[in-house]
Image (cartoon, rainbow, N blue to C red):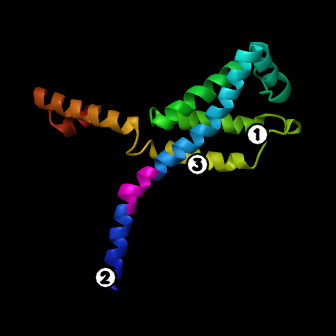
Amino acid sequence: MIKILRAYETLTHYAEKWLSPVLDLAIRIYMAKIFFVSGKQKFDTYMNEGWEAVVLFFSDYHPVPGLDPHWAALGGVSGELILPALLALGLFTRFSAAGLIIMTLVIQFAVPEDYGVANPQHYMWMLLLAVPLIKGGGLISVDHVASKFIHQAKRQDNQETGALPEMVEKEA
């Protein structure tokens, strides 16, 4: 029985160490693609038909209650292009995941039902986006690399000033 438990412990250790970061990356890329493709389609519409065609989309087909269609178009297209890029890179991961969750919530609940844009799949999107929102970008992310540089700089600063790490943390 002890051998089975040790084997299980070893397997879970390697899964957490190697598979969890890959899963985090896969979720980020999967979700980023969905939103980026949508944003690119709207941007292509802008390039081919002009900005008014994009605004028409946000006034006639996908209105956002309480928001002028011009602002909705600007925010929607910008959000669908910038936030997925950040999410895929794992840069400002929690911020980008939160922004995409908010966009999904608006699509699912704020747009009137008779427009037909509500989709049960949006619940799965929000669930998947909750992973980077809660966990962050994971080991395979720009956030993780930046965090290492920030912590290293803090350690060097502490060594130069002679401050103890716990004193610096309490002051912050």
Near mark 3 (Cα within 10 A), the count class, few <14, some 14-19 or many ≥20, is: some
Q: Decide: is 79 above or below 145.
A: above
Q: Is residue 158 above or below residue 27?
A: above
User: The N terminus appears in which quarter of the rendering?
Assistant: bottom left
Q: Quadrant of residue 43?
A: top right
At label 1, which amino acid type do we have?
Answer: Phe
Residue 56 falls within the magenta-colored stretch: no
Q: Position of residue 56 (x, y in %)?
A: 82, 20
Labelled pair 3, 2 in contact (Cβ < 8 Å): no
Q: Residue furthest bottom?
A: 1
Question: Which residue was labeled with disc 1?
Answer: 109
Q: Viewer-proximal residue, 80 or 43?
A: 43
Q: Secondary structure at mark 3?
A: helix
Please say whether residue 130 is visible from this viewpoint.
Answer: yes
Query: Mark 1 falls on what kind of element?
Result: helix
**Residue 3 tag number:** 2
Tell me the CA gap for discs 3 and 1. Answer: 18 Å
- What residue range appears in magenta? 15-22
Give the distance between the C-alpha atoms of the residues marked 2 and 1, in whole angstroms.
51 Å
Which of disc 1 and disc 3 is earlier in sequence?
1
**How many other residues sit within 10 Å of disc 1, few (<14), some (14-19) or many (≥20)?**
few
Dot placed on the residue nearer the N-terminal end, 3 or 2: 2
| Residue 48, picture quadrant | top right
Q: Position of residue 82 (x, y in %)?
A: 56, 26
Instruction: Measure the alpha-carbon separation of dots 3 and 2.
Output: 35 Å
Residue 54 image-quadrant placement:
top right
* 16 falls in the magenta region: yes
